[in-house]
Each structure stands twice: as structure tokens, then as C-alpha cells.
Image (spheres, rainbow, N blue to C red):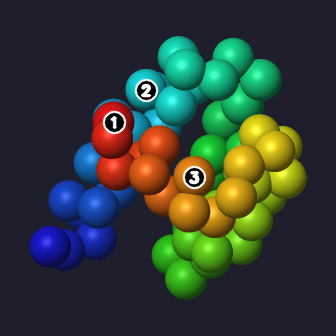
Amino acid sequence: MNTTEVKGNWNEQKGKLKQKFAVLTDNDLMFEEGKREEMYGKLQIKLGKTSEELHKIIESL
């Protein structure tokens, strides 16, 4: 999977996450190459979820 595919998939998942969790903003979900874990950490704090819970939520989208 190339970077374009990842960004395309992420845009779709981002929309679904924003629907599920209204508190999330575009800035919360900004995907930067090499900073995925940092973004996940911020989401964990904002949503009050563990890493495992967050990964399951994203995989289920």
C-alpha cells in the first residue's frame, strides 16, 4: 500500500471517527507521515481510551 492509498483510507476513517466522536476536530485527526503514534496518543487522551481500545475502534470502521 502506498502513501496515497493510506491517506485516502485515512480520510475515509477520519470522517467516520468524527461522526462517532463529535468532540474530534480535523486538527485532532491530522495524519502526518511518521507521526501516527503521536496522533494516536493525542486521540487516546482526548477520548479517554486505551491504545488497544483506540486501535479496535479504528479497525472496526
Say which of 39 and 53 sits in front: 53
Amino acid of disc 3: Leu
SS for callout 1: loop
Amino acid of disc 1: Leu
* Label of residue 44 in the image: none
Q: Percent from the top left, x then y, of residue 39?
A: 68, 63
Residue closest to the far left: 1
Residue closest to the far bottom: 34
SS for callout 3: helix
| Residue receiving disc 1 | 61
| Cα–Cα gap, marks 2 and 1 | 7 Å
Which tag, 2 or 3, sits closer to the chain's start? 2
The residue located at (72%, 31%) in the rendering is: 25
Which tag, 3 or 1, sits closer to the chain's start? 3
Numbered label tally = 3
Find out whether the residues at labels 2 and 1 contact each other: C-beta distance under 8 Å. yes
Quarter where residue 46 is shown: top right
The residue located at (57%, 71%) in the rendering is: 36
Which tag, 2 or 1, sits closer to the chain's start? 2
Q: Give the label, 2 or 1, closer to the camera.
A: 1
Q: Percent from the top left, x then y, of residue 50?
A: 70, 58
Q: Percent from the top left, x then y, of residue 29?
A: 62, 46
The residue located at (66%, 35%) in the rendering is: 26
* Label of residue 16 in the image: 2
Image quarter where the C terminus lies is: top left
* Label of residue 54 in the image: 3
Is the residue marked by circle 3 packed among few (<14), some (14-19), or many (20+) residues within 10 Å? Answer: some
